[in-house]
Amino acid sequence: MRQMNRLHSALFFTGGVLMVAGAGCYAMLAMQDVACWVYLAGALLFATMQASETYDGRNDTIKRLKKIMNLADILFVFAGLLMVENTYRLLLDSLSYATYIDMVYNKWVLLMLVAAMLETYTVHRISVELAKEEAAEKTHEDTPPTADC
């Protein structure tokens, strides 16, 4: 994986902190009208920085895990959009009350949970796969060349 520079790392960290602060304040019912926007801004920043981190290797497993990680980022952003919807109830007029409750109300929690699980899984698996790849490259470099007879 290509390493992030200092600016990207700082933006990535800031996005993560904003996500945690926004979700925490929202769940604790503290300034929900602001907390939902803080979370959404953090999710957008986090997802953008994580999507900009590319993998240029040939390991199909890491490529697949990176796609799953991008899906988790999209789910984080959708969770933020549903959090904003839950606060301002913009769709309530266009849907019946029962449909709104069934389809929209508090569904941000489910999306955030699924995204967090996918993110945790992919971060762990990518680090394991990168360690395997690095060990294989080191072993390959340490092996002396053989003479062809």
Image (cartoon, helix red, strand yellow):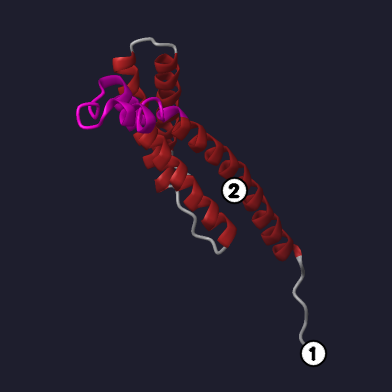
Pair 1/2: label in front: 2
- The secondary element bearing badge 1 is classed as loop
Locate residue 145: give its quadrant: bottom right
Is 139 situated left or right of 109 in this image? right
Of all residues, the one furthest to the left in this rendering is: 93
Residue range corresponding to the magenta coloring = 80-109
Check disc 2: other Cα within 10 Å, few if <14, some if 14-19, many if 20+: some
The amino acid on which the numbered mark 2 sits, given as a three-letter code, is Ile
Mark carried by residue 149: 1
State left or right for residue 92 relative to residue 10.
left
Q: Is residue 77 left or right of residue 96?
A: right
> Which sits in the foreground, 139 or 69?
69
Q: Are marks 1 and 2 in contact (CB under 8 Å)?
A: no
Residue pushed farthest bottom?
A: 149
Residue at x-position 33% and y-position 15%: 32
Check the image and report above or below for 31 versus 129: above
